[in-house]
């Protein structure tokens, strides 16, 4: 790198701040970004430490917000945990954030999974009457619901409970 390029290059702190301007990031994401921009390990760590001390980087808070987002999207805990780990959040932070999120929001993943299943089984009539129509429940639909719940990151025991519950709806027709 020439002296002119070095002069015009942003500091690691400026580059990290610009990277954080669009959305929250994890410490690992910022480290990777700065490394990719060819900042030294010391510059990278100094910027991450300063942003952390200023409160702009906080993996715990990131995980809490991610669990909120995840729940709004009707996704399960396992998917959120996997995605947070992929973003470089420490497993202990992930676990603590979930426990706090679950406690503060009275999260019941079985109920959340059941809500997704109801969305697959029941639909509103197209005629504008607002009537609720139940689809024909067969093993194909139940399997589809199971796959959907698994893809969304719900735990196996909740998935099996929901599938059993849906089978009881079949008998009520």
Image (cartoon, rainbow, N blue to C red):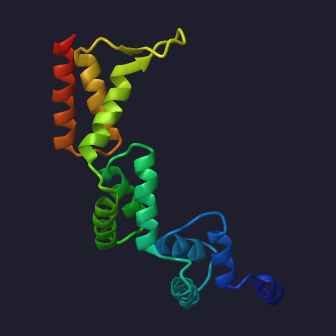
Instruction: Pinpoint residue 167: horizontal percent, then vertical percent.
Output: 18, 21
Q: Name the residue at 26% across, 17% down.
A: 140
Left of 95 or right of it: where is 70?
right
In terms of image quadrants, where is residue 117? top left
Instruction: Pinpoint residue 42: horizontal percent, then vertical percent.
Output: 54, 91
Q: Is residue 132 above or below residue 105?
A: above
Left of 151 or right of it: where is 142?
left
Q: Name the residue at 40% across, 49% down.
A: 71
Nearer to me, 141 or 87: 141
Q: Name the residue at 53% across, 81% down.
A: 55
Q: Is residue 87 visible?
A: no
Outermost residue toward the right in this view: 4
In terms of image quadrants, where is residue 142? top left
Q: Is residue 49 above or below residue 117?
A: below
Instruction: Pinpoint residue 40: horizontal percent, then vertical percent.
Output: 58, 86
Instruction: Pinpoint residue 103: horizontal percent, then vertical percent.
Output: 28, 62
Nearer to me, 30 or 124: 124
Q: Name the residue at 52% across, 88% down.
A: 53
Q: Quadrant of the C terminus?
A: top left
Nearer to me, 126 or 65: 126
């Amino acid at each position: 790198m020439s002296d002119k390029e070095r002069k015009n290059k942003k500091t690691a702190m400026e580059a990290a701040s610009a990277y954080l301007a669009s959305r929250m990031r994890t410490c690992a994401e910022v480290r990777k970004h700065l490394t990719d921009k060819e900042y030294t390990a010391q510059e990278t760590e100094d910027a991450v430490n300063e942003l952390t001390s200023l409160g702009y980087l906080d993996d715990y808070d990131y995980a809490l917000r991610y669990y909120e987002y995840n729940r709004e999207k009707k996704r399960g805990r396992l998917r959120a945990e996997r995605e947070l780990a992929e973003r470089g959040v420490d497993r202990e932070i992930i676990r603590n954030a979930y426990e706090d999120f679950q406690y503060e929001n009275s999260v019941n993943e079985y109920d959340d999974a059941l809500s997704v299943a109801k969305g697959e089984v029941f639909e509103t009539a197209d005629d504008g009457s607002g009537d609720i129509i139940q689809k024909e429940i067969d093993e194909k639909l139940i399997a589809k619901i199971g796959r959907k719940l698994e893809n969304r990151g719900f735990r196996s025991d909740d998935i099996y409970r929901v599938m059993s519950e849906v089978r009881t709806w079949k008998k009520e027709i």
